[in-house]
Image (tube, grey):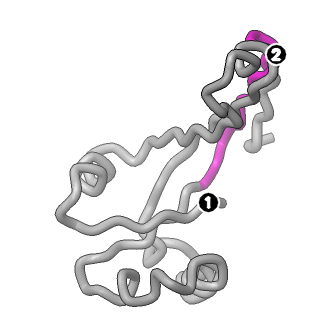
Amino acid sequence: HLFFATTRATRKFSNLASDRRVSLLVDSRRNETADFRQAAAVTAIGQARPIEESGAPAEARRLYLGKFPYLKEFLDSPTCVLFDVDVRRYIRVDHFQHVLELDMTS
């Protein structure tokens, strides 16, 4: 699972209210020429839901604040929502076109 926080006033929140499908991209680019062949990227694809709908909201909040303690005031705001992403699939790309997919549902 992946967690992220946002406020109810954001476009992100509005989009998630109507469609819970998400994808998150993390990559190793450094804006260098070598990135073309050496950079790697991972996309996580899944469904996001507010932690209140998950089985362990207190645990999710504890994990999030353990990593980002400086966001406690933000997370405590009544307009803030902490989301839990249930990752269904990871896609890893490296060496420009080498693709590896990992299905988390099987």
Q: Amino acid at mark 1?
A: Leu
Residue in the image at 17% along x and 63% along y:
9
Q: Quadrant of residue 38?
A: top right
Indicate the secondary structure of the residue bearing disc 1.
strand
Q: Quadrant of the C terminus?
A: top right
Q: Position of residue 12 (x, y in %)?
A: 30, 51
In the image, which residues are magenta? Answer: 86-99
Name of the residue lying farthest toward the top: 97
Q: Position of residue 13 (x, y in %)?
A: 28, 57
Q: Which residue is mark 1?
A: 2
Q: Sequence-wise, which precedes: disc 2 or disc 1?
A: 1
Q: Position of residue 67 (x, y in %)?
A: 65, 77
- Give the camera-side residue of 34 and 6: 34
Q: Which residue is mark 2?
A: 95
- Give the camera-side residue of 3 and 88: 3
Q: Amino acid at mark 2?
A: His
Q: Nearer the viewer, mark 2 or mark 1?
A: 2
Q: Quadrant of the N terminus?
A: bottom right
